[in-house]
Amino acid sequence: MKLFLSLLFVCPAGLLLAQNLPPKNATPVPQPTVTMMADDLGSRPPVVPPDKVILTVGDLKITAKQFDQVIDTLVPENYRSVAHTTGRKQMADNLVRMIVLSQEAQKRKLDETPSYKTQVQFQNINILASMAFEQINKETKPPEADLRKYYDDHKNDYEQVHARHILIRMQGSPLPVKPGQKDLTDAEALAKAQDLRKKIQDGGDFAAFAIQESDDTGSGSKGGDLGTFHHGQMVPSFEQAAFALKPGELSEPVKTQFGYHLIKVEGKDVKSFEDAREEIAKQLQPQQTQKAIDTLKNGAAVVYDPDYFTVDKK
């Protein structure tokens, strides 16, 4: 993760280096057809020793390892795969331009100006801060008690239902009326749903009725099968009814903005704490890292000028 200061110091160089590189998913320019092997050899960097000098600009020599490090530290992430492969020459051209400008700045003694010295100081701070952040993020782990508490407090998030439904559309529904069918009123749609429910209770096949009668054509063609879903994925009234049913149970008609639904639950389960542990740890990790950083900040001798920072009370 890059800290905020990287926007001030690291990104300008990265943008300069990447400005002529095509985005990873850019549409390629048509090229003449050439018969080659299955792998495009030009897209893979040649294998060379990491200490081999692959670029020289004046007295500055850059090895293959340094070239890769420049890409990984200065080029925006979405450009890196291109810079390492098909964009290697463009990357080198951009790097040469930056080095030449840097050498010209030294000739003009811009490296002796207060502005340069200030920027170098804070760029070094930014680089070290980013490295420290990465180490702290790897070292800190959410306590077991926090993981379990999060799981207990959010157990509903790990509950899932596999269900089928039959939808009977009513007037005002955002779904279109099927060709050749009547635009049912609310009362007519409810009556049809109740009639279908009775037929299913009397032994009718739910999936067959879904194929024949459901106005949700997407799931209807699959016997009404909606697959497995979690809390928050369905409209509230549908979700409430589905999660209240036991496996094998058939709901009363449930009204939503789409019409009346008959819901049949095929199965329910809850992901165990052990299965959810890794997911929870990843979710809580940023908070844990932030706590560690806050501890460092609170322990530092920090003094804000009261006159300069009167507007910002934080």
Image (cartoon, helix red, strand yellow):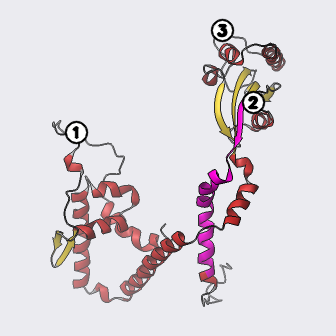
Q: Nearer the viewer, mark 3 or mark 1?
A: 1
Circle nearer the N terminus (2, 3): 3
Question: Relative to 98, does residue 79 appear above or below in the rendering?
Answer: above
Q: Main secondary structure of the magenta part?
A: helix
Does residue 287 show up magenta in the picture? yes
Residue 308: quadrant of the picture: bottom right
Q: Which mark is residue 233?
A: none
Determine which residue is flagged by label 2. 257
Point out the tag, 3 or 1, that comes first from the N-terminus: 1
- Look at the picture and state if 303 lies above or below 90: below
Relative to 89, 225 lies left or right: right
Determine the residue positioned at 38% across, 87% down.
Answer: 117
Three-letter residue code for mark 2: Gln
Q: Which residues are magenta?
A: 266-295
What's the CA distance linking mark 2 and mark 3? 22 Å
Provide residue 83's location: percent of width, then percent of height. Answer: 29, 58
Q: Residue at x 71, y 65 (%)?
A: 145
Which label is found at residue 38?
Answer: 1
Per the image, label 1 sits on a secondary structure element best described as: loop
Q: Is 214 left or right of 64, judged from the image as shown? A: right
The amino acid sitting under disc 1 is: Ala
- Residue 23 coordinates in the image, percent (x, y): 35, 51
Badge 2: residue crowd in 10 Å (few <14, some 14–19, many ≥20):
some
Q: Residue 211 appears in which quarter of the rendering?
A: top right
Q: CA–CA distance between discs 3 and 1?
A: 53 Å
Amino acid type at circle 3 is Gly
User: Would you name the residue on which mark 3 appears?
Assistant: 180
Residue 311 lies, in percent from the top left, at: 66, 80
In the rendered structure, which disc, 1 or 2, sits on the residue that comes first in sequence? 1
Q: Residues within 10 Å of mark 3 (few under 14, many from 20)?
A: few
